[in-house]
Amino acid sequence: MNDKLVTVFGGGGFVGRYVVQALLRAGARVRVAERDPRRAWFLKPLGGLGQMQFVAADVTRADTVHRAVAGADAVINLVGVLEGAFEAIHVTGARNVAEAAAGAGVEALVHMSAIGADPAARSAYGSTKGRGEEAVRAAFPRAAIIRPSIVFGREDQFLNRFAGMIEAFPVVPVLRAPVKFQPVFAADVGDAFAAALAPEHAGRTFELGGPDVMSMGEIIRWLATTLGRKPSIVELPDAAGALLASLPLAPITTDQWQMLQRDNVVAPDAPGLAALGIEATPLATVAPDWLVRFRRKGRFGRRAETLYHA
């Protein structure tokens, strides 16, 4: 990948920063495409002289997408939303990127989807992700598609959100406690996108998950133990969860509630991280390093406890 130019749509996002880092380590030149490129300027110090470019692009506007892929050797599309303009972003936007990549004659396209993507899914998120995959393959049949489970990392809005709740409240309600996830480390996802650009992966679909399959209840309890806190953990019945999701200003949307009705784990026969030459990182080996800020007295408390028990 040395000196290849890769356009990364959404490179300034949570997953994007890890994808960009992986590409830079591989020697690629990276063009980060964002609606507001200033959101991605924090990436500048990661690249060498002339290794980073920034361009304004909106995946829903085909003209800006075509400009962003002009002259690129490969394209990665990471743009997605958890609520709001699902059709515009996941279907129209995905189609725009794939058609622009095909028109520009790029060597490879890697598209970010999600486990559970299915045009027939009950949730708008899952159904538009599924139709987005169809749109990408129709325009660029050689595209590689990556479907991660829930992605965790230092900047995530998953572990950090629940850790903040455990830190702040004596009682922590849990929605859909039995539903299973296979949390995958953001750095592994970044490496996977870079690896998927290789010609031998053209046209393949990968599902990414870590080595641990955990229920929502197990994740919350693991967090509480890791943080050294003992909140009362209340597993809400589904009737209460559905009612909560329907309320204005609820912490979860009705569509997100629908997404929680099925496990979010890698299919048994799906190629994953190992097929891309990546060893999955266990949650417990990395997450405590940044979750320590949610412990009482933070790092000082952790250090004091270590010394005391030694």
Image (cartoon, grey):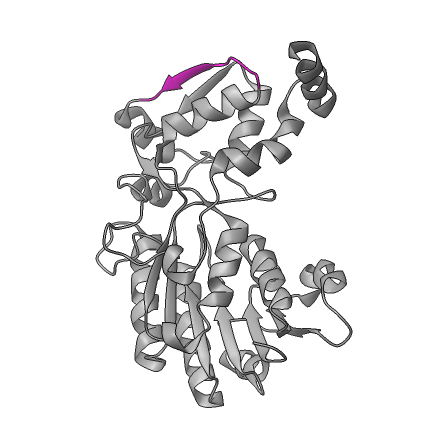
Expressed as whole percent of the image width and height from the top left, the position of residue 247 reads 39, 33
Q: What's drawn in magenta, residue-wise?
A: 228-236
- Asked if the stretch drawn in magenta spans residue 233, the answer is yes
Q: Is residue 82 visible?
A: yes
Q: Residue at x 50, y 14 (%)?
A: 231
Give the quadrant of the N terminus.
Answer: bottom right
- Asked if the stretch drawn in magenta spans residue 302, the answer is no
- Taking 118 as reference, is 284 above or below it? above
Q: Quadrant of residue 229?
A: top right
Q: Does 306 sit left or right of 272 as displayed?
A: right
Q: Residue at x 78, y 74 (%)?
A: 49
- Taking 277 as reference, is 31 above or below it? below
Give the quadrant of the C terminus.
Answer: top right
Q: Is residue 35 visible?
A: no
Q: Quadrant of residue 23?
A: bottom right
Expressed as whole percent of the image width and height from the top left, the position of residue 266 reads 31, 49
Residue located farthest toward the top when viewing the structure as drawn: 308
Residue located farthest toward the front when viewing the structure as drawn: 310
Expressed as whole percent of the image width and height from the top left, the position of residue 151 reads 47, 47
Total tally of numbered discs in the picture: 0
Q: Does 278 sit left or right of 131 as displayed?
A: right
Q: Does 16 sit left or right of 129 as displayed?
A: right
